[in-house]
């Protein structure tokens, strides 16, 4: 899930100053009035592809757990697992678009994604569960971030001690709130046009490559 989240948050590489310009995003937006032919379709495809990779990774990891480690997956909890995965994917996809909107270039989008997700994973007990050894302020920070709520909600669907249907609505509610905040930020900040100054740098790099 961490890898797929990082992919979603770093999809700003599809902006025109990254790879989208070479794929003809500008031309896509002018060939037809149909939104499916425009850059929105390209962005939706990027997010959709990352989510599908996440689905495949989920199936492989759960399957490996069942076959190699005798993990017991209760059929009654599969709907909760699917719901949690979908809500989490939507949340982090929207946050990814918001991060891409803040970044000034494709390269800085990837760096910003790493600088965001890796510390969040540590304070959210994704890598190591610090338990009661953490400072109280770090506990508060982790509780405010979406990744901890996603991890707890999904772990509940796999726990043999949780009661069916194992849906933690309060945790999913936090993810929905984060998705809403990310949507507002993405709507205000994300543009397909490259940030001022980034096109010039990209053009100069392209010119140097051409001259070589």
Image (spheres, rainbow, N blue to C red):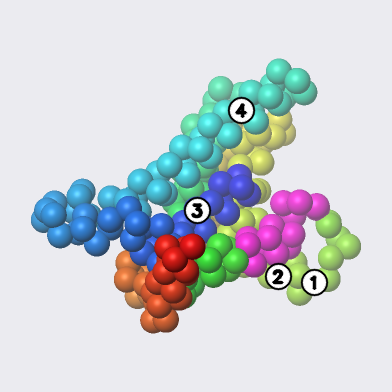
Q: Is residue 193 above or below residue 47?
A: below
Magenta span: chief secondary structure: helix
The residue pinned by badge 2 equals 140
The N terminus sits in image quarter: top right
How dense is the environment of label 3, judged by Cα within 10 Å: few (below 14), some, or many (20 and up)?
many
Q: Nearer the viewer, mark 2 or mark 3?
A: 3
Q: Can you give x and y, in whole percent of width and height, for residue 125 in the image?
A: 74, 55
- Distance from label 2 to label 3 (Cα)? 25 Å
Q: How many marks?
A: 4
Mark 2 / mark 4, whichever is N-terminal: 4
Q: Can you give x and y, in whole percent of width and height, for residue 2 in the image?
A: 63, 49
Residue in view at x 54 percent, y 70 percent: 108
- Distance from label 1 to label 2 (Cα)? 6 Å
Q: Which residues are magenta?
A: 114-129
Mark 1 secondary-structure assignment: helix
| Numbered badge on residue 60 | 4
Labelled pair 2, 4 in contact (Cβ < 8 Å): no
Residue in view at x 80 percent, y 53 percent: 129
Whether residue 53 is visible, yes or no, is: yes
The residue pinned by badge 1 equals 136
Q: Nearer the viewer, mark 2 or mark 4?
A: 4
Camera-side residue: 197 or 144? 197
Camera-side residue: 70 or 98? 98
Mark 4 / mark 3, whichever is N-terminal: 3
Asked if residue 166 lies in the magenta stretch, the reply is no
Q: Can you give x and y, in whole percent of width and height, for residue 88 in the image?
A: 51, 49
Camera-side residue: 36 or 73? 36
Labelled pair 2, 3 in contact (Cβ < 8 Å): no
Mark 4 secondary-structure assignment: helix
């Amino acid at each position: 899930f961490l890898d797929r989240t990082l992919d979603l948050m770093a999809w700003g590489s599809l902006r025109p100053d990254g790879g989208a310009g070479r794929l003809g995003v500008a031309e896509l937006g002018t060939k037809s009035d149909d939104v499916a032919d425009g850059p929105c379709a390209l962005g939706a495809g990027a997010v959709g592809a990352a989510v599908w990779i996440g689905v495949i990774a989920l199936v492989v990891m759960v399957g490996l757990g069942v076959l190699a480690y005798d993990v017991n997956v209760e059929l009654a909890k599969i709907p909760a697992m699917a719901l949690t995965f979908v809500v989490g994917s939507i949340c982090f996809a929207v946050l990814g678009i918001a991060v891409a909107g803040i970044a000034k270039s494709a390269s800085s989008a990837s760096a910003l994604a790493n600088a965001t997700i890796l510390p969040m994973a540590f304070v959210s007990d994704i890598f190591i569960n610090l338990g009661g050894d953490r400072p109280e302020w770090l506990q508060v920070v982790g509780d405010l971030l979406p990744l901890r709520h996603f991890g707890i909600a999904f772990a509940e669907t796999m726990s043999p001690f949780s009661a069916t249907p194992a849906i933690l609505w309060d945790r999913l509610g936090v993810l929905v709130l984060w998705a809403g905040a990310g949507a507002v930020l993405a709507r205000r900040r994300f543009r397909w046009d490259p940030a001022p100054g980034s096109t010039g740098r990209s053009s100069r790099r392209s010119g140097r490559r051409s001259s070589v």
